[in-house]
Image (cartoon, helix red, strand yellow):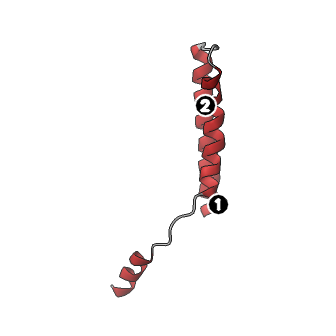
Amino acid sequence: MRILVKILLSIAVVIIGVIIQAVISESGNDSTGLIRLLPGAIIIFGIIGVWKYLPKKDTDNRNLDKNV
């Protein structure tokens, strides 16, 4: 299940990056190269963030569930 969620989040990050690139291209702002690098950075760091994220083990909630 976690792999499926990570794949879906990766696809969402790529779609967001492509949409931002399309908006930048349509605005016609060719003079600033840094703005053109932004969608690529969003895609790269977004995918790295999705795959490197590890949820914390929450033992307090598990202990509370056992007591109920």
Q: Amino acid at mark 1?
A: Ile
Residue 19, x across and y down, in percent: 59, 30
Crowding around mark 2 (Cα neighbors within 10 Å: few <14, some 14 to 19, many 20+) is some
Q: Quadrant of residue 12?
A: top right
Asked if residue 56 shows in the view, the reply is yes
* Residue plotted at (60% across, 12% down): 28
The mark that comes first in sequence, 1 or 2, is 1
Q: Nearer the viewer, mark 1 or mark 2?
A: 2
Q: In which quadrant of the rendered image does the N terminus lie?
A: bottom right
* Residue plotted at (58% across, 29% down): 20
Q: In which quadrant of the rendered image does the C terminus lie?
A: bottom left
Q: Which residue is mark 1?
A: 3
Examine the rendered structure and indicate whether residue 17 appears above or below residue 9: above
Q: Quadrant of residue 52?
A: bottom right
Instruction: Give the numbered dot on residue 38.
Output: 2
Examine the rendered structure and indicate whether residue 17 appears above or below residue 58: above
Task: Tell which of 62 and 31 is nearer to you.
Answer: 31
Q: Residue furthest left?
A: 68
Examine the rendered structure and indicate whether residue 51 appears above or below residue 66: above
Residue 2, x across and y down, in percent: 60, 62
Residue 60, x across and y down, in percent: 39, 77
Mark 1 → mark 2, Cα distance in angstroms: 27 Å
Crowding around mark 1 (Cα neighbors within 10 Å: few <14, some 14 to 19, many 20+) is few
Residue 55, x across and y down, in percent: 53, 64
Asked if residue 18 shows in the view, the reply is no
Q: Quadrant of residue 32?
A: top right
